[in-house]
Image (tube, helix red, strand yellow):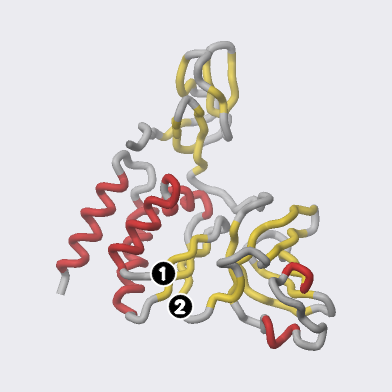
Amino acid sequence: MESNRKIITPGETIVKGEEFLPGEGTRREKEDIVASRYGLTDISEKLVRVIPLSGVYTPRRGNVIIGEVVDITFNGWLIDFGGSNNGFLSIMECPRFINKDELQETFDFGDLIVAKVMGVKAKGIDLTVRIRGLGKLEEGSVIKINPNKVPRVIGKEGSMVNVIKDAAGCEITVGQNGLIWVSSNSIDNEIKARKIVGFICENSYTEGLTDKVKEFASKLGEEK
């Protein structure tokens, strides 16, 4: 069951009570949990946070992101993930040994990759693809959304992603940086996935979103 969500402004009291814990975008003032930024309230198991409705992606260690290879150095690749600086993927962070003269054969200019943020620095981030499921994204297309909409597209423990996969018949990878990779053997399925993601983003502030998405997807399935 989804927690009640409402739009909140900085300084507004979200809930009262010492049993609640302040999370991201909130602070405690005596017995009150108060919003410290504009966004959408989220209360889950006594943890209170505010999901921002606008803004840019801020890299964090452990995030999974999608980016494009924009340069190749003598020991790795520079990845544009939409941040103020590029990410760096070292050949040491690949799942197999790579000779320095084989870099372009592994990841070439323009390739899309899904990687995990290993470290955050002032001038960029360090990436890894040594974990299963990471690496080059082959066929498919990319959807770009506001990074702050990503939690709603993913859903609790990936529930919303599973709804999209089942409804559209697509493979989907969601990057925390707001890039979503969609792949299917049918262009119609990819278009359907795009429409569902768009619906989620447009209605991210509403309650009972999962049921609304299922209903929307069902209507898409009825279209000729």
Task: Examine the rendered structure and indicate whether residue 181 appears above or below residue 97.
Answer: above
Residue at the location (67% across, 81% down)? 107
The residue under label 2 is which amino acid type?
Answer: Gly
Estimate how packed mark 1 is, as few (under 14), some (14 to 19) or many (20 or more) residues with alpha carbons within 10 Å: some
As drawn, the residue found furthest toward the right would be 74
Quadrant assignment, res 193: bottom left
Q: Are marks 1 and 2 in contact (CB under 8 Å)?
A: yes
Q: Which mark is residue 54?
A: none
The residue under label 1 is which amino acid type?
Answer: Glu
In the displayed structure image, the side of residue 7 where residue 220 appears, left or right? left
In the rendered image, residue 26, in percent from the top left (x then y), is placed at 57, 28
Front position among marks 1 and 2: 1
Quadrant assignment, res 76: bottom right
Q: Earlier in the sequence, mark 1 or mark 2?
A: 2
Task: Examine the rendered structure and indicate whether residue 121 appears above or below residue 69.
Answer: above
Kindly identify which residue carries mark 2. 140
Q: Secondary structure at mark 2?
A: loop
Q: Secondary structure at mark 1?
A: strand
As drawn, the residue found furthest toward the top would be 30
In the rendered image, residue 103, in percent from the top left (x then y), is placed at 75, 83
Q: Which mark is residue 171?
A: 1
Q: Closest to the observer: 132 or 197?
A: 132
Estimate how packed mark 2 is, as few (under 14), some (14 to 19) or many (20 or more) residues with alpha carbons within 10 Å: some
